[in-house]
Amino acid sequence: MRVSVRQENLARGLGIVGRAVESRPTLPVLANILLRTGDEGDARLRLSAMNMSSGLSISCWIGAQVGETGAITLPRNTLTDLVNNLSPERVDLSLEDSTRSVTVRCGANVSTLRGIDAGEFPLLPESNGSDEVALPAELLRNMIRQTVFATAREDNRPVLTGVFAEFKENILTMAAADGYRLAVRTGELEQNFEEPRSMVIPGRALEEVARIISDGDDEVRITFPGERDIVLFHLNNVLVSSQLLENRYPDFSAVIPGDFSTSTEVYTGELLRACKRAAIFARDASGSARVLVRPADNPSDPGEVVIAGKSNERGDNTDMVDAHVEGGELDISLNVDYLIDVLNVISDERVLLQSSGPPGPGVLKLKDREDFIHVIMPMARTG
């Protein structure tokens, strides 16, 4: 193998695929990144990495001048550190098959990396190009960001570490829950599904998809799972594949309240800043903060939302933001960190906070849209 690439392109590609390398792989070759030239006439170099434990693999294609085709795997950490510290110019890679070593030349620098034969790298999932759906890249990125944060981080219930995705008629629904909160986001598709298709995609894989999508990407194609229960995301010169999670996803619709006694409209940024200040003092109470909503006495005056965090040892904080309140007074305790998580992914200027008080949950919606809802279960009052 002899190939030349631009340093910045190689560094970017390694940064994308390197995130799929697990820290303690079961096979030595899985600590490496696979470098493979395309077929003759294909002026590209493919970089690939795989995490066997999570079933995640990422491949990235970069432009290259291919003098001789071939493949090798090289240690992720050594290769990435080296390339990131090379000067921004042409990088020449040449493989010595007998020693499985690659000479890296860039300007006056010459390095040699020892690798593992590409034949020891597991077979990468490939798409046959059938049974796909295309959707706008920005829509998918927003839907992921507004749901994946609510997935469970512990694997006590593995299915909750994933995001439920359902394609039904011309609507994609994505939902994530960890037992204490629920995020649901819908998006409209151009394609229509007469028969619903659903799957549970690991949150880790979706986080990588959202991270890779750039502002210049127009669309993402999703290949539905076949016999191997693997979903593939086709991005611009990047392919992300992930093993799906087994088991049936819980019926989350039962958690969403049908009506509320109090509905509060508030500016998203003001509420977020108040929550961040309350969180400083709510840490000792497992993040529990008091949320008090007061309607205005005079209809011409604004109501208010009070966010209070308290620590018996470090003090307390109380913040008040103006709000438009419909209904009665609300006094509920919510995990303020959960409030911060959801407010961080809302770009809309105003948000609705709704509830019927404990023991019911708090619900956040968007002011002028029906495609997002977030449910947070109440906490016991502390202090």
Image (spheres, grey):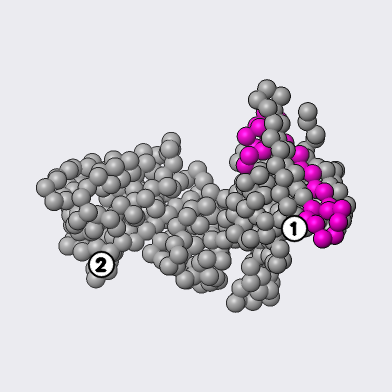
Residue 155 at least partly seen: no
Residue 265 - label: 1
Q: Which residues are magenta?
A: 276-303
Quarter of the figure with the N terminus: bottom left
Q: Amino acid at mark 2?
A: Ala
- Residue 44 visible here: yes
Q: Residue furthest left?
A: 108
Q: Position of residue 16 (x, y in %)?
A: 39, 53
288 magenta-colored = yes
Q: Which residue is mark 2?
A: 43
C-alpha gap between disc 2 and disc 1: 55 Å
Splitting the image into 4 quarters, where does residue 306 fall? top right
- 264 magenta-colored: no
Percent of width and height locating residue 246: 63, 50
Marking on residue 198: none
Residue 57 vs 236, above or below: the answer is: above
